[in-house]
Amino acid sequence: MVDSINLDTAKELIDAAERKAEEIDNPMVITVANSEGNLIAQHRMDDAWLASVSISRNKAYTAAALDMPTHELAEPSQPGNSLYGLQTTDDSRIVIFGGGYPLMDGGENVIGAFGVSGGAVEQDMEVAEEGVQRWEELRG
Amino acid sequence: MVDSINLDTAKELIDAAERKAEEIDNPMVITVANSEGNLIAQHRMDDAWLASVSISRNKAYTAAALDMPTHELAEPSQPGNSLYGLQTTDDSRIVIFGGGYPLMDGGENVIGAFGVSGGAVEQDMEVAEEGVQRWEELRG
Amino acid sequence: MVDSINLDTAKELIDAAERKAEEIDNPMVITVANSEGNLIAQHRMDDAWLASVSISRNKAYTAAALDMPTHELAEPSQPGNSLYGLQTTDDSRIVIFGGGYPLMDGGENVIGAFGVSGGAVEQDMEVAEEGVQRWEELRG
Amino acid sequence: MVDSINLDTAKELIDAAERKAEEIDNPMVITVANSEGNLIAQHRMDDAWLASVSISRNKAYTAAALDMPTHELAEPSQPGNSLYGLQTTDDSRIVIFGGGYPLMDGGENVIGAFGVSGGAVEQDMEVAEEGVQRWEELRG
């Protein structure tokens, strides 16, 4: 059994992120995965990029699969650095730019992941962080 | 540009199907795709089968890609029949048992698709038909 | 070098098949491949099934890859017969129902292949045979 | 239902690009896709590179999937830039060099995409731009 956030919570996190995406007028695809990287919920906002369906899902997957936000992978996977080549491992599901975040229980355990794609990386991160923040509020 | 049901409508259809799934006490994974088989929204109900994430997505894909409900493919793809072997075509995304339905525009055009997986085929179909019926109500 | 029909010829074969598809009022996806199964030309007629994009390409591939029409594979790949399981070999590109044909030089050499998908198998075959016949006329 | 350019239009765009490719004596593979990145038509000119069959298809896919010309992706996906790693996302269908263009409806909607591969990137772009220009003439 995976100790994971449930579908109702996932929908709340997605709603929070969608509101942010509407506020900045940038439609996004938003995914919540469980701690094993498998999908709980995914929404493609109207007019969001098609490519973002796959990218948001894999950002959530990556955050769960490596227990860290995807933007932390950018630096070590640069040419010359220690993890150069990382993005083609794991059947190329690893995304090495920002927009994917693990969702933590109050301690050190990952119990889900959040992935957003649809704009520039900073916008993806801004929208994703709304979902993460909502999670931290709900977790109490 | 795809003339398709939007995300708000997709969420309503999924909600209708989820209520049915709760009523029959069988958690399901439910997918809405657009007319080209690409994802609009997907929800995995708590405790639904992991395999159903892929199966419900591919049922929706199949209904869009062949313009027909997936249960209509079961008979022609039996051994000895004309489409035997169909399920491994199209990168094995074709599902040949029930639970995938095209969503029509009132005339002859497919404008989306609905896919449900998580139980016996009859249960998948029963739950999916709630979503399809809700679509027909909304379409007016 | 592959001794193959050229693009101009491929377009003529496709045109002949498209006329037949219009005559029987069934939009099709039509592919011409070279003798190595690689694409020369592909057309998706308006409103043809999305799944047929992949299926027509793989019918042409199969006819080139096995030097025979795809409908000849149906019988040997039935359960209990000698090639049972064939359709999942070769990365699942092998199609075991009708609609794919090799294009022969005047003798025994395959110099291309033709694949049609979009209707019932008999219709796919009827339309594909127009292309094959056009090839035989052009070859003289 | 996809609001898309039809097959007849697609063939006209390809013809315009083929004439340009002949003029510069560089055989190309040319693809037209719909707004969801799925194929409408593809031609491989005689002696065009085999690799270009996949590359032109994926250039058209990328332009549809990200609503922008593929050459605009080159800079942001360089090492050190924000989208480094982009080309291996979305099942490695994303092409990050020039030759793919969205086809617009006159306003802000993408209704198709055009992809060319077979030469140096500047040549691919030059040939593709003929197809895009022909589209703008036809659209009126």
Image (tube, coloured by chain):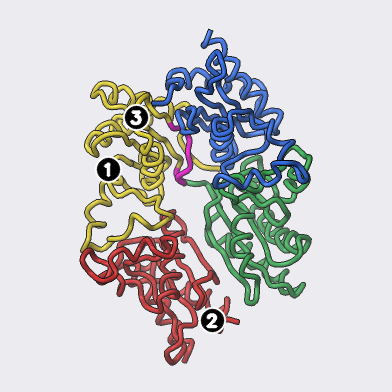
Chain colours: A blue, B yellow, C red, D green
- Whether pointer 1 and pointer 3 mark residues with C-beta atoms closer than 8 Å, the reply is no
Q: Can marks 2 and 3 be said to lie on one chain? A: no
Instruction: Based on the picture, tell me whether residue D42 belongs to the magenta stretch.
Output: no
Image location of residue A17, percent across then percent down: 58, 22
Give the class, few, some or many, for how many residues have Cα within 10 Å of label 3's Cα (few <14, many ≥20). Answer: some
Give the class, few, some or many, for how many residues have Cα within 10 Å of label 2's Cα (few <14, many ≥20). Answer: many
Magenta segment: B35-42
Residue beneath the point at 30% across and 75% down: C72
Front disc: 1 or 2: 1
Residue beneath the point at 70% across and 57% down: D99
Q: Can marks 1 and 3 be said to lie on one chain? A: yes
Left or right of B120 on screen, residue A44:
right
* B63, above or below C98, in the image: above
Pointer 1 chain: B
Q: Amino acid at mark 1?
A: Gly
Please give the label number shown on residue A61: none
Front one among B1 and B96: B96
Residue beneath the point at 27% across and 43% down: B98
Image location of residue D63, percent across then percent down: 64, 49
Give the class, few, some or many, for how many residues have Cα within 10 Å of label 1's Cα (few <14, many ≥20). Answer: many
Q: Quick one: SS at disc 2?
A: loop
**Residue at numbered disc 3:** B48
Give how far apart the Cα atoms at labels 1 and 2 are: 42 Å
Task: Say which quarter of the image contains residue D107.
Answer: top right
**Residue at numbered disc 2:** C5
Please give the label number shown on residue B98: 1
